[in-house]
Image (cartoon, coloured by chain):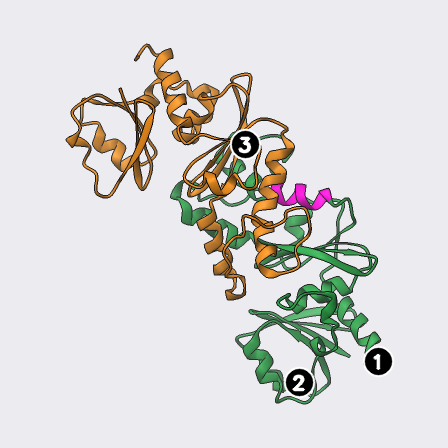
Chain colours: A orange, B green
Amino acid sequence: MLLCDIGNTTYHFFLKGKSYREDAALFDPSTISEKVFYICVNEQVKEALKALENWIDLSLHVDFTKYYKTMGVDRIMACEAIDNGVVVDTGSAITVDVVKEGRFEGGFIYPGARAMSECYKNISSALIYSFNFEVDLDRMPKNSQDAISYGYLKLLQREVNSYKMDIFLTGGDAMNFKKIFPASSVDETLLFRGMTNIMKRADLC
Amino acid sequence: MLLCDIGNTTYHFFLKGKSYREDAALFDPSTISEKVFYICVNEQVKEALKALENWIDLSLHVDFTKYYKTMGVDRIMACEAIDNGVVVDTGSAITVDVVKEGRFEGGFIYPGARAMSECYKNISSALIYSFNFEVDLDRMPKNSQDAISYGYLKLLQREVNSYKMDIFLTGGDAMNFKKIFPASSVDETLLFRGMTNIMKRADLC
């Protein structure tokens, strides 16, 4: 059983407990003949996949009344993976979603590291610094790189920690963010666990 | 006595308790014959002003050992205005600086509203929303506009409130941010009070 999470830049596959990625610009989905259960946030790709019978859109089996209309299906799958906790999905955006006793309680969206770095750069050439994920977030900064790193990282850390819940880190930048959430569980296949849960409930596996 | 805070886009003047702005692209500083005490974050303008004898650079009278080398002189002046509290200066960037008993304790830099809005937009067309400064920050969001507004505003609010100090709001966007810091004091002339304090100490007035 092949699962796939399709983003704007990659096809992220999951097969027998292992995951691998294909570049979305180069990958041709018609080269796969076996059944693929997928989610997709890219509307163009989603449209194209309708022509392929073996590609099955799992979003059709989601109970959207538990979430909200414009919520990304990748966020929903991550929430479906857990019963209690906060999911921090670190991609081009960082999505933070709270689940209590299997119920989605709400969530927020924060810029990913690359986008935020560009943001500072666009404000002023005096703010061109890479983020220091190892900055001491327990003291107020007294230099420019730390002032920017703290502004980006401490505010996220304080917010997420305030929920006093287990933290589930996923997404491409999870290992960097593990530094500011040392007690979190990193799980790159969190979304696939959510997809599997949806499939079980829909009798698809 | 004329004071002036020169930014990248405006000359902000202060005369007899009142302030007014001139467009930096159009204003010619040589048209002023009286003495002007100024600070300037624009290196090009600063260089040009050296030729005008009546324009006096107040940054030369700042004790930089209290601060740090690359810290903007506008941030320093805001800190010089208060003895205890947190300054939130809301411009193209938002600078947050803590002062305790007249001592600078450190500070951080966060994107201003316009820059942050562009940042979300650059991540995905699905994230093009204006910030809702009246979003209820006491509940987790369940729609896209609130998810973005919360991501930007709540994190800043929680961080600044955690200091449990008086909040001094200044800068062009102060009235919007007053909505998330209702107990703060808004003072558009905070920097000029700091400049006046520096002048008193340097026997310039």
Is any atom of residue B103 visible in this view? yes
Q: Few, some or many C-alpha atoms within 10 Å of disc 1 (few <14, some 14-19, many ≥20)? A: few
Mark 2, Cα crowd under 10 Å, few <14 / some 14-19 / many 20+, is few
Left or right position of A59 against B128? left
- The residue depicted at 56 percent of the width and 48 percent of the height is A134
Residue range highlighted in magenta: B153-162
Q: Seen in the image, is B137 located left or right of residue A45?
A: right
Label 3 sits on residue? A184
Q: Which image quadrant is residue A156 in?
A: top right
Q: Chain of mark 3?
A: A
Q: Position of residue A106 (x, y in %)?
A: 54, 28
As for residue A48 lying within the magenta part, the answer is no
* Quadrant in the rendering for residue B163: top right
Residue matched to label 2? B32
Q: Is residue B164 above or below residue B101?
A: above
Residue at x-position 47% and y-position 48%: A113
Helix, strand or loop status at disc 2: loop
Looking at the image, which residue is at 67% across and 67% down? Answer: B74
Q: Give the residue at mark 1.
A: B203
Q: In this rendering, which labeled residue sits more in front, label 3 or label 2?
A: 3
> In this rendering, do the residues under marks 1 and 2 share a single chain?
yes
